[in-house]
Amino acid sequence: MIDDGMYLNPESPKTRSIRKASYKGKDVLLIGGESHKAGQGKAVSHHYLALEKFAEETFGIKQVIDRWSAQDLTTLDKLPYIGPMHDDYPNIYVSTGYRKWGMTTGTLAAMILSDLAEQKQNRYADLYDPKRFYADPSIVTFLRENLNVATHLIKGKLDGTKQSLGKLERGTGTVFKHNGQRSGAYRDDDGQLHIVDTTCTHLGCEVNWNDGDRTWDCPCHGSRFSYTGEVIEGPAEKPLQTKSFTMFDAIDVDQESSGY
Ligand code: FES
């Protein structure tokens, strides 16, 4: 075990953060790392396994109590936005873009926002002003992020995935196509299929299966949906459309016989 405190191993690509916590009266470790974009790159299970391996090799930990993924918002210039959101609404404040430093930045935000609310000077207010605009490197980052979104939008539409639902094991999900339409299927632990339209309800990119959390994740702006289609995390506000189980059950039989 480690002493109280938070520790960060900044080496790339194996950044790890470690801190001690208490769970049901016992000391546990919170180990974070494996940064990646939602819905992009390697299977999420790969990231969880890497963290478990690190925990075992470094601390001899054999039991994992829980695991989860969270999203950290990053602004164009990587500094948080803290302050009045817009000149037209000077009394509406925003505080976001903490880039994984929520405890530190949350405290900073409280100091800045309380000063602003009381109309006091704060020496950091200009630095974190949400209305700032720096042409460089913000423009480059902005263009790169939008290119990334465009790439995934097109890639998702061209996805030629062809999977057989008949072979889909319990607790697993997959993307498949029928009559040219991309859909997603998850077979729960009781064997029931849950089928969704994989078109994200935010701006129409195609969601991908997250095998670590059993969710549908959008590679464009990070919306996440449960395997039954409900929104877990925005910016999407509407659930994924679900599809008739009965219809696809029949397709499943077709797939097996036709090698679909
Ligand atoms: S298109 Fe899916 S989150 Fe924007």
Image (cartoon, grey):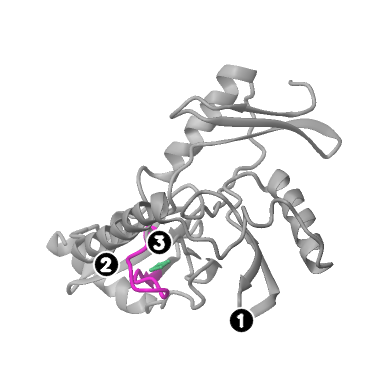
Amino acid type indicated by mark 1: Asp
Tell me, for residue 88, which label it has, or none. Answer: 1
Q: Percent from the top left, x then y, of residue 204?
A: 34, 73
Look at the numbered disc 1 and say if its residue's Cβ is closer than 8 Å to ligand 1. no
What's the mark number on residue 42? Answer: none
**Residue 116 or 148: which is nearer the viewer?**
116
Ligand 1 is located in which of the four quadrants? bottom left
Mark toward the viewer: 3 or 1: 1
Q: Residue 218 carries which label?
A: 3
Q: Are marks 3 and 2 in contact (CB under 8 Å)?
A: no
**Predominant secondary structure, magenta span:** loop
Q: CA gap, disc 3 to disc 2?
A: 25 Å
Q: Is residue 76 left or right of residue 153?
A: right
Question: Which one is in front in this view, the residue at disc 2 or the one at disc 1?
Answer: 1
Find numbered disc 1 in the image and state the secondary structure of the residue it sits on.
Answer: loop
Residue 249: x and y, percent? 32, 72
| Dot 3 or dot 1, earlier in sequence | 1
| Span shown in magenta | 195-208
Q: How crowded is mark 3: few (under 14 residues within 10 Å), some or many (20 or more)?
A: many
* Residue drawn where x is 48% and y is 72% of the image: 236
**The CB of the residue at mark 3 lies under 8 Å from ligand 1:** yes
Residue under label 2: 252
